[in-house]
Each structure stands twice: as C-alpha cells, then as structure tokens.
Amino acid sequence: MGLPENIETRLFINGEFVESSNGKTFDITNPATLKLVAKVHEASEEDTDNAVAAAKAAFPAWSALSPDQRGQYFKKLAKLIRENNDELAALEASSMGRPIGAYFDAYMSASKWDHYAEAGYSVQGKTLDLCVQTPGYLNMTLRQPYGVVAGIIPWNVPLLFLANKLAPALIVGNTVVLKSSEKAPLTSAKVATLVKQAGFPPGVINIITGFGNVSGSILSHHMDVRALSFTGSGRTGRIIQAAAAKSNLKQVYLELGGKSPAIIFDDADIEKAVKETANSIQWNSGQVCMANSRVYVQDTIADKYIELFKQNFENEVKMGDPLEARENGVNHGPQADEAQHKTVLQYLESGKQSGGELITGGGAPSDRKGYYIQPTIFKNTPEDAKIMKEEVFGPVVNINVFNSEEEVMAKANNTEYGLYASVYTKNIDRAVRFAKGLEAGTVGVNCTSPVTGPDMPFGGYKSSGSGREGEPLYSLDNFLETKSSLGRV
Ligand code: NAD
C-alpha cells in the first residue's frame, strides 16, 4: 500500500489551512525505512495565539446551538473518518510505524464521534424549591461550558485520543484547540481536512502541529484556555499541571503512563492467557500506556507459561514494513522514532544488568535498518530494578514467578502507576478480590489490554492521571462548569 499523494502538513486555524507564521517546518521520517515522509509546519507562538483567538471568537455561536445541532456535525465527521480509513492507516504507518493491519483507530475514533453526537442531552442540572435556608426561592443549577478548551495528545494512538479530547468538550458547547504530537501529526492534519469537509463553523475546531516548546507550553500557560485535557508522559503532565498553576488555574485532566501487571493463576486457561498477555506487550511494538509490562505467573505453571510465551514471540511475531502489512502479514513495526528506539535499547541493557534472566530477544535485530526491537522476555527481574519500576514503552515484558495471593497482590500494587491491571483465574471469589484490590483505573478479569470497553470510563489511579475519559457520563463533567442560580419567586 502506498502513501497518499497530497499530504496535508499545514495548521488548521479558523477554518483555513495556513503555513507556520515564522516559516518553520520539521521532518517526519518513516521509522521503518528512514526515508523522509513530509515536512510539517510548526506552530509558532503567534499561530498558537491565533488558534486560541479563533476558538474564543467561535464560542458564543457554537455554545448557542442545541446539542442535536452540534451532534449533526459529529455524525458527518464520523462518516468521513470511516471512509478515509485506508489513507489514515497509511499515514500512521509511515510516520510512527503501526502496521496497517493492526490499525483500528479510524473505526474507534469514528465510533466515539457517533457516541458523543447523542450525548449532549444527558447533561442536566437540578431544581430545588424546598430549600429551608432560602424559603420563597426557586434554586437551580446550570451546567455551562468553559469556553476554550485545549487538547494535547501523544503519538501512539493519535486519532482515538483526538476524539476523546474533542468530542466531549465540543458536544457541551466548548470550542477547541488541539495540538497533535510532533512524532505523528499527519493523521490529525488529515482529520482537519475532514472537519472542514463536514462543515464545522470556522474556529470551532483548530488543529495545530508542533512541539511542547513552543505551542504545547503556550496552550498550558494561556489565560484564555479554561480547561486542558492531556494524554502523554507523567513528566509532561507535571509540567502542564505546574503551568496551569502558574497561569489561570485552568482545569487540567491527565491521562499518563503505566506499568501494568497481569496475574496468571494456575487455574487459568493458560493458552488464552499467553496469547493475550503476549499481544498486550507486543501490539504497537509495546508503545501502549496500558501494556502489561509486568506479568506474575503462579509457580506451579511458570515453566509452561514462559515456554509458551517464548514460542509466541519467536513464532507469531512478524517484523517488516508496516505499509506492507496487508500483503505479507507484518504485525510488528519499528519503534516510533530514533529517540524511542534508543530509550528502549538502554532499558534492555539495564534489564540485562539487573539480575533478571533474559529468555528471548534483548536488542535490535541485526538484519533491519529501521528502528526495530526484538520482542523481549526477562524472567524474575528484581522488583526494585529500573525496568520493573519505569515505563519502557517497548515490546519488553518481565515475567516473575509468585507463590501466594497475598504476595502477588502486594507486588502488583507496588508501583506509582495505576492505569490497568489484569487477573486470569477461574475462581470467582478470587476474581472479585483482585478486581477490588488491584489499584488501577481498569481491571481486566480473564482479559487484558488493549481491551477496554468503548462504553467504559478510562483513566488512572495514583500517578497514572486524573479524570476519566472515553464515556460521556464521566467525561462531559470535565468540560462543564456548575452554576448555582438562586431565584426569588
Ligand atoms: P510526551 O509527554 O512526550 O508528549 C505528549 C504530548 O505533549 C506531545 O504532543 C508533546 O508535544 C507535548 N508536550 C511535550 N512537552 C510539553 C510541554 N512542556 N508542554 C506542553 N506540551 C508538551 O509523551 P509521548 O512520548 O508523546 O507519549 C508517550 C506517553 O504517553 C507514555 O508515557 C504513555 O504511557 C502515555 N500515554 C498515556 C495514555 C493514557 O490514556 N493514559 C495513552 C497513550 C499514551
């Protein structure tokens, strides 16, 4: 499959595509072939300000529409995203290396837009006419949009995050500025062309490309941005939280990293558990916030489980050019870029020094020039090793052996992260104990990531973030103020 001929690389501000005001562009290089894919316009301070100003100007008219009127635009956009699936898949494959066969983001993203199209009428305030402290008054609460909302997204599953940021904010009447990731900006720019085609009024959705410094930082400090929803690393999340504290105390919602445990008891369906836990850490080359990077297997089945896991990595994983995935079954692409590749290689070296046993993989394949990493298993890595504590964001799993429930619950929760956790067992009492006891925003019972219910809220415990997204009941609240209005009757 080839690349589309005219790749959009400009900024989408106030309904128009514009070049960077200072003429700066940055390169997108295909991580599989190391060839230049596109030169993308980098938003300057002026461009970012213009995008916020456009969103601010569009707010009064957009917020005055009914949820149904706003939802009609969402439905048109969802249809266009589905129709452009192949082009979006090719753009993602050539910028961050996702095999096109493993691309379902357009489908997920379109479903989110459709889902939120219907969600606006679920927003409700309440009336109180029996308030003892204010007799003779009719008291009510109003739910109102903030105004301008910003979204900042990472590169690993961009279109899903774009929908998760934009759709809930927009359906309740906010207008938005989205900054895509400098590592994978092409699909967001393509969506901007579809936003225009769907007929959204100018300024309602602005999509800019650029780096943390300048555009990300400008948005985080901007006095006219009233709420900011971020997905990315904990390091950047902390910087954004601090920027909000230093500027206008905007509401900040954070979806951050993970070091997710999967626990396999000896009564589990072992073949199913191997297949799913191996896929969790190998899908998207391990570049998934909720990937089960720590697996705990009960001692009675440990040898068999690890042998099957090794066979899965050695026999089922097919590396190759992500763009050729449909023709030749490639299911394992490169890491997103050189920096990501280097980081993973450093973690592999630290894993080898940590005292854990290397079972398979352990480096870059010698027969490929792209940023590939061999799927890697370490066994019994010490709990305090760097590779057990920190997010690697690569196809690297630590499988440690445990003996008792108490021991494994304590080890699984011994992390600052709390995004996703899984337990595989046929014992219903134990399943409930672990569903309750694991400290994570999502717990899978006999399933693991990347499975998440499309109608379930997603977010992190502890340092994995704040707020929930993906499901209207929880996420609409992120983008609404509550006003108490007291009326004398
Ligand atoms: P990152 O934090 O480096 O970058 C994310 C975004 O923040 C990018 O758009 C980047 O340009 C921007 N940014 C960088 N510095 C900034 C600054 N100073 N101010 C404002 N914006 C700034 O993360 P990444 O490498 O793109 O993504 C990987 C991380 O994202 C991993 O930690 C992963 O676990 C996490 N992630 C979390 C979820 C989730 O839902 N919890 C989902 C996907 C990825």
Image (spheres, rainbow, N blue to C red):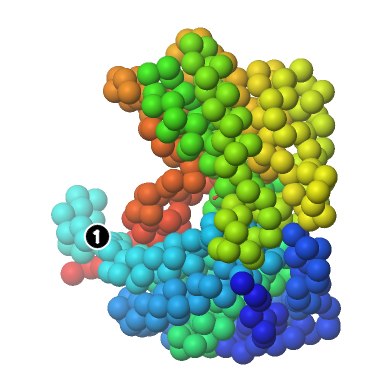
- Among the 4 quarters of the image, the one containing residue 24: bottom right
Measuring 73% from the left and 25% from the top, which residue is drawn there? 358
Residue 111: x %, y % from top left: 39, 65
Report whether residue 241 is seen: no
Measuring 65% from the left and 60% from the top, which residue is drawn there? 322
List the residue tagged with mark 1: 126
- Among the 4 quarters of the image, the one containing residue 226: bottom right
Q: Nearer the viewer, residue 132 or 278?
A: 278
Residue 108: x %, y % from top left: 44, 62
- Among the 4 quarters of the image, the one containing residue 316: top right
Residue 132: x %, y % from top left: 19, 50
- In terms of image quarters, where does ligand 1 lie? bottom right
Describe residue 60's horizontal placement relative to residue 278 as left or right. left
Residue 43: x %, y % from top left: 74, 75
Q: Amino acid at mark 1?
A: Lys
Q: Nearer the viewer, residue 251 or 181?
A: 181
